[in-house]
Each structure stands twice: as C-alpha cells, then as structure tokens.
C-alpha cells in the first residue's frame, strides 16, 4: 500500500504550468479586469499572428468554438456536413447543434485522418460543409480537401484542436494549422491536455472580416456594437441581430494563455523529441505501428497513438491497459468511432461496414503518454 502511494502517476497528457504563469494570472486577478478585458484581445492577436491568420476569436471552450463556426458558416436544418468518425464527439455534435446532419467519411488507416476520396463519395446536394480533423497533431491533406470543397462551393472548417503548431508543406512553403490558407475557419482547444491551456477555452481563426464579426457576435448573445451606433444613439446602445450565446472567455484565462503562448515553441520541441524517442524504441517491434512520419508535414503530437495488434499478441486491450495502469502508466483510447456511439447509432444509423479503416484503427488504438513535463526517465 505504501509503495502504491509513492508510485509516480504518468497520464497520457497533462498541462505544464510554471510559476510565471501563476504570477501572470494572479496579477490579472488583482487588476480592474477579470472578464472581457484587454488581455482577451491581446491573446487573440498573439494567437492569430502565431498561426498566420488575420483574425482570432477566443471563447470558453473548443466545443463553443466549433458551435459558433458552424453557425457563422450558415449551417441549418436540412443541411449536411462531412467529417471524420475518429474524433472527439464535439466535432459532430456541433453540426447537430446547428440542426444539420453529420455525415461520416472513412479515414486513411496510416495517418488516421479523413480520406479525401471518401469525402468525394459523401457529397450530395445537401452537403454544405467539410470539417476535417487533424488527428493527434498530424495535418490532413488540406490542399486536396480544399480543391474538392471549392469545386462544389462548400465551406471548410478545420478542427485543429489537436494541432496548434502543426504545419504542412504547400508549393514549397510551410503552412501552419490555423492560417486558414485552405479553409474558411479553424478551431482550437485550450483544454489542459492540449498544447497550451487556459483551463478551459478555445478559439477560431479566420481571414474573413465578415466571419470574424459574426463569430464575435455569436460569442456574446448575438450582440453587435459599432462606433456609429454609439455616436447616433448613445454609448449604451447595442443591437442583438442573431441568437447568440454566452461563450465568452475571461481575462485571467487569457493571461494564462499569453504565458503559455510564450512557451509554445518549446512545448512543441519537447513533444517532438519524445515522439522521436518512442519511434526509435518501438522500431521493428512485431504487431506494433507508430504514428507515420511524413516529410511534408510537421506533427504537433498532441497524442502519440500506437496501433497494437492485440489479437496476434495474445492479450486483450483491457488486460494490457490494466497492466500499464498497475505500473502507474495511464494510457487512453482516442477514439471510439462516433457512428458506434448510442446516440448516433439510434439517430443516424450509419452502416459500420462502410468504415473499414476506422474500425481497424479503433481495434488497435492506444495513446501513450506525451506531454512537455515528461522526463527521459518517464519516457
């Protein structure tokens, strides 16, 4: 029992908070602004600059960010949007929130990202948007998806909640996730296990002024305020033009976010170093596949998802999982295919036979620990 108490716990992911982060937040809590103050805008500008986008809108969570993007994009009842079944529920839930129907396209087994060829098969007259997910930190084939979408006049919303700092090469240049070079909007999450954290929080980047204004309004009850309104009507005046939400983020959260952004490049360097250590350690192990390394992509390694042939190894995933947990190592499985979740099975009845790669991946998936605070001994 005593040994169990002393045993170090190594989770699959964890925030990395420094004393400087704590000082920044404490200083903000002692200021005049703790909710929608100047640090929210400062954080948005810094994030947009890092990603190479014109605008960023910070909100209360990655889920809130996804919700307002589909609304700003005009999705409604009767519309369909194509996305990956291997993602967190928030991606497809946001489509449902708008009254639209999520349509799943199978993944490519290696990168675990949505297959552009499968996207093509799912497009019909009701399709209005594509939501590609940069799974685990590896960018999707965005130039190819963009080409498909523009040919059909479809909206693209990148779910980059796993991928702050990820990059892909296009025409000889490195493009950052969030630059919206091949999309209309990109969504990020700042949950504690992500690349940077604001406790809970999220953001949307875009290069469209029109979408930017719409996103800001949807974040705050659908309210619009302009200098012209104040001059004509008075300083108190505002107009609610859309049905929005209270998805605002606080100043002290953004203070933490600014401190985290200062360390982001170092966080990414550490994650990539850990990934290389794993790649080397697992190379050539029968029945075990590591995440692919692609020369035209820079993986942000939010996760390190192994594919393990448990059947050939003669052990169930649960038994394997339990043995690791007994040693203080807590992996995770990302994710059970959304079409297999009870709500989606009942409401949308997707034929799981059409998702060969998603099913195969899920049977073998196990994400192991990767976060900046890990020591070499932990690894």
Image (cartoon, rainbow, N blue to C red):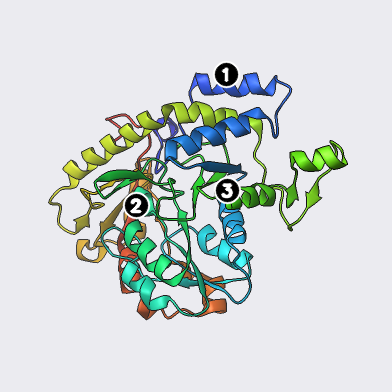
Assign a secondary structure to mark 1.
Answer: helix
- Which residue is label 1 attached to? 23
Check the picture and name the quadrant holding the C terminus: top left
Assign a secondary structure to mark 2.
Answer: loop
Question: If you read the primary sequence from the N terminus, does the residue marked by circle 1 or circle 3 appear first?
Answer: 1
- Which residue is label 2 attached to? 139
Q: Are marks 2 and 1 in contact (CB under 8 Å)?
A: no
Q: Picture coordinates of residue 251 (x, y %)? A: 65, 31
The span from disc 2 to disc 1 (Cα, nearest Å) is 34 Å
Q: In the image, what residue occupies the spot 63% across and 74% down?
A: 77
Number of numbered discs: 3
The span from disc 1 to disc 3 (Cα, nearest Å) is 35 Å
* Residue 141 visible in the current orientation: no
The span from disc 2 to disc 3 (Cα, nearest Å) is 25 Å
- Which residue is label 3 attached to? 209
Question: If you read the primary sequence from the N terminus, does the residue marked by circle 2 or circle 1 appear first?
Answer: 1
Q: In the image, what residue occupies the spot 62% across and 44% down?
A: 60
How many neighbours does mark 1 have within 10 angstroms: few (below 14), some (14-19), or many (20 or more)?
some
Q: In the image, what residue occupies the spot 35% across and 40% down?
A: 370
């Amino acid at each position: 029992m005593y040994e169990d108490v002393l045993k170090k716990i190594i989770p699959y992911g964890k925030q990395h908070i420094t004393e400087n982060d704590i000082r920044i937040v404490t200083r903000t809590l002692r200021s005049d602004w703790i909710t929608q103050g100047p640090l929210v805008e400062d954080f948005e500008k810094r994030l947009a600059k890092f990603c190479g986008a014109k605008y960023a809108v910070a909100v209360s969570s990655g889920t809130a960010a996804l919700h307002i993007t589909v609304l700003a994009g005009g999705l409604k009842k009767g519309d369909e949007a194509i996305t990956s079944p291997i993602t967190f529920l928030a991606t497809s839930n946001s489509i449902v929130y708008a009254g639209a129907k999520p349509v799943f396209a199978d993944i490519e087994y290696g990168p675990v990202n949505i297959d552009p060829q499968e996207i093509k098969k799912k497009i019909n007259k009701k399709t209005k948007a594509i939501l590609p997910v940069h799974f685990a930190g590896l960018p999707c084939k965005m130039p190819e998806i963009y080409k498909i979408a523009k040919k059909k006049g479809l909206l693209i919303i990148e779910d980059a909640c796993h991928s702050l700092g990820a990059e892909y090469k296009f025409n000889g240049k490195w493009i950052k996730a969030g630059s919206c070079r091949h999309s209309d909007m990109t969504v990020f999450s700042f949950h504690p296990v992500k690349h940077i954290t604001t406790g809970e929080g999220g953001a949307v980047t875009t290069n469209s002024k029109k979408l930017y204004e719409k996103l800001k309004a949807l974040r705050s009850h659908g309210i619009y305020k302009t200098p012209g309104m104040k001059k004509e009507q008075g300083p108190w005046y505002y107009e609610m033009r859309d049905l929005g939400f209270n998805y605002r983020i606080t100043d002290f959260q953004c203070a933490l976010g600014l401190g985290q952004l200062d360390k982001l490049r170092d966080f990414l360097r550490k994650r990539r170093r850990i990934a290389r250590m794993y790649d080397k350690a697992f190379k050539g192990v029968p029945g075990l596949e590591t995440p692919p390394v692609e020369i035209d992509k820079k993986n942000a390694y939010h996760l390190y998802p192994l594919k393990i042939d448990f059947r050939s190894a003669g052990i169930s995933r649960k038994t394997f999982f339990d043995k690791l947990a007994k040693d203080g190592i807590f992996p995770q499985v990302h994710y059970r295919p959304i079409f297999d979740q009870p709500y989606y099975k009942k409401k949308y009845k997707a034929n799981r036979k059409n998702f060969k790669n998603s099913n195969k991946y899920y049977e073998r998936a196990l994400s192991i620990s990767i976060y900046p605070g890990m020591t070499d001994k932990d690894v």
